[in-house]
C-alpha cells in the first residue's frame, strides 16, 4: 500500500511539474510574440516618421501603389 501511495505522489508531482513547464513555455512564447510585434511597430513608426519628415521638407515622394482588392 505504501508503495502505491508513493507512486501516486510521484506521478502527481510529475504532472504538476509538466503543467508548470508547459505554462512557462507558453508565457515565454507570448512574450516573444509581443517583443516581435513591438519591433514591427517601431519599424513602421520609423518609416512613417521618415516619410513625414521628407514630405514636410518638400521632397518628392515615390510611394508604392497599393494593390486594390478584387
Image (cartoon, grey):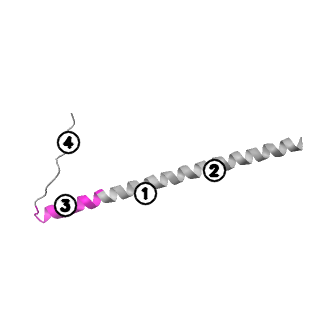
Element on which disc 3 rests: helix
Name the image quarter holding the N terminus: top right
Camera-near label (2 vs 3) is: 2
Q: Are marks 4 and 2 in contact (CB under 8 Å)?
A: no
User: How far apart are the alpha carbons under marks 1 and 2?
Assistant: 23 Å
| Circle 2 residues within 10 Å: few <14, some 14–19, many ≥20 | few
| Circle 3 residues within 10 Å: few <14, some 14–19, many ≥20 | few
Mark 2 or mark 1, which is nearer the start of the sequence? 2
User: How far apart are the alpha carbons under marks 2 and 3?
Assistant: 48 Å
Camera-near label (1 vs 4) is: 4
User: How far apart are the alpha carbons under marks 1 and 4?
Assistant: 29 Å
User: How far apart are the alpha carbons under marks 3 and 1?
Assistant: 26 Å
On residue 20, the disc is 2
Q: Are marks 1 and 4 in contact (CB under 8 Å)?
A: no
* Residue at the disc numbered 1: 35
Q: Is residue 38 left or right of residue 48?
A: right
Q: Is residue 14 left or right of residue 4?
A: left
**Per the image, is 51 magenta?**
yes
Q: Which residues are magenta?
A: 44-59
Q: Are marks 4 and 3 in contact (CB under 8 Å)?
A: no
* Residue at the disc numbered 3: 52
Amino acid at each position: 500500500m505504501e508503495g502505491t501511495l508513493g507512486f501516486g505522489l510521484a506521478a502527481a508531482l510529475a504532472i504538476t511539474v509538466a503543467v508548470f513547464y508547459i505554462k512557462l513555455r507558453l508565457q515565454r512564447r507570448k512574450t516573444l510574440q509581443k517583443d516581435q510585434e513591438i519591433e514591427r511597430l517601431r519599424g513602421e513608426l520609423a518609416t512613417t516618421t521618415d516619410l513625414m519628415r521628407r514630405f514636410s521638407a518638400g521632397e518628392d515622394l515615390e510611394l508604392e501603389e497599393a494593390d486594390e482588392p478584387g
